[in-house]
Image (cartoon, rainbow, N blue to C red):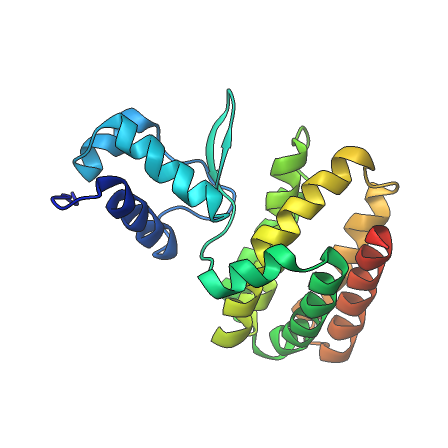
């Protein structure tokens, strides 16, 4: 159990929660324990936990959903990146994502391990689970794309992708609330094509499928 002794306690609690998220205790899209559980773990009161959660929500790390709970929406947000991305147009961000994810897809097709494939398959299946809210679907989509980037085994690409997640997530949620996916089967097939190419170790096909998917996503925001 982590004990906090110096003020301001809310700042310390926020950093401890962020460290636990970075360490993988809670994955992208997962729900945090309630205040009554977190407060004794951190050695602070529930009001301090609430303030810590508000801080991390403001940084794009957590999302507090009324009547549902608090969810992890990003694994890390370097402050400089956060300021840049908040100012950036979503199309600009998708163009940068393309530079990262297309390369990552090709590398993943070359470097993926059996563990990577299990994670990618599981993420693809979760993405199409029935009964998801818009937020849950977007979180599942981000998890799938992140597992592909991780499978490239390039720490810089992973860190860059993580920096984009909060900005892209907010835009995707807003867009899907206004304009749901017109053809869910085609959308799934686009993601499945990337996964299949990675599975079969076809780097060129993986990069082509990734580029096509992100181009379609960009067109949706144009």
Instruction: Please tell me which residue is depicted at 62% across the width and 78% down the height of the picture.
Output: 107
In the image, is 112 to the left or to the right of 214?
Answer: left
In the image, is 207 to the left or to the right of 126?
Answer: right
Q: Is residue 75 above or below residue 38?
A: below
The number of numbered discs placed on residues in the rendered structure image is: 0
Instruction: Please tell me which residue is depicted at 38% across the width and 37% down the height of the picture.
Output: 53
Q: Is residue 203 above or below residue 48?
A: below
In the image, is 10 to the left or to the right of 179?
Answer: left
Between 47 and 22, the residue placed more toward the observer is 47
Residue 158: x, y in percent? 52, 68
Instruction: Please tell me which residue is depicted at 22% across the width and 41% down the height of the picture.
Output: 9
Residue 107 at least partly seen? yes
Between 159 and 119, the residue placed more toward the observer is 159
Q: Is residue 212 above or below residue 175?
A: below
Residue 44: x, y in percent? 19, 33
Location of residue 222 (image quadrant) = bottom right
For the N terminus, the image quarter is top left
Location of residue 70 (image quadrant) = top left
In the image, is 96 to the left or to the right of 5?
Answer: right
Residue 74: x, y in percent? 50, 51
Location of residue 140 (image quadrant) = top right
Residue 118 at least partly seen? no
Instruction: Please tell me which residue is depicted at 61% across the width and 37% down the height of the picture.
Output: 136
Q: Residue most toward the top?
A: 67
Residue 26: x, y in percent? 40, 46
Between 200 and 141, the residue placed more toward the observer is 141
């Amino acid at each position: 159990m982590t004990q906090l002794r110096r003020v301001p306690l809310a700042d310390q609690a926020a950093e401890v929660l962020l460290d636990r998220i970075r360490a993988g205790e809670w994955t992208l899209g997962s729900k945090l324990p309630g205040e009554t559980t977190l407060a004794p773990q951190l050695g602070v009161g529930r009001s301090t936990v609430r303030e810590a959660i508000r801080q991390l929500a403001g940084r794009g790390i957590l999302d507090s959903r009324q009547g549902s709970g608090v969810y992890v929406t990003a694994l890390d947000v370097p402050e400089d990146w956060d300021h840049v991305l908040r100012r950036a147009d979503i199309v600009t961000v998708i163009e940068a994502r393309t530079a990262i994810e297309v390369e990552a897809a090709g590398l993943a097709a070359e470097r993926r391990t059996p563990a990577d494939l299990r994670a990618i398959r599981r993420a693809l299946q979760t993405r199409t689970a029935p009964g998801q809210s818009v937020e849950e679907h977007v979180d599942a989509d981000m998890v799938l794309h992140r597992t592909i980037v991780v499978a490239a085994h390039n720490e810089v690409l992973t860190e860059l992708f993580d920096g984009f997640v909060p900005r892209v997530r907010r835009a995707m949620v807003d867009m899907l609330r206004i304009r749901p996916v017109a053809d869910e089967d085609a959308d799934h097939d686009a993601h499945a094509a990337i996964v299949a190419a990675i599975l079969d170790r076809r780097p060129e096909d993986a990069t082509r499928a990734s580029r096509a998917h992100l181009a379609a996503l960009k067109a949706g925001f144009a």
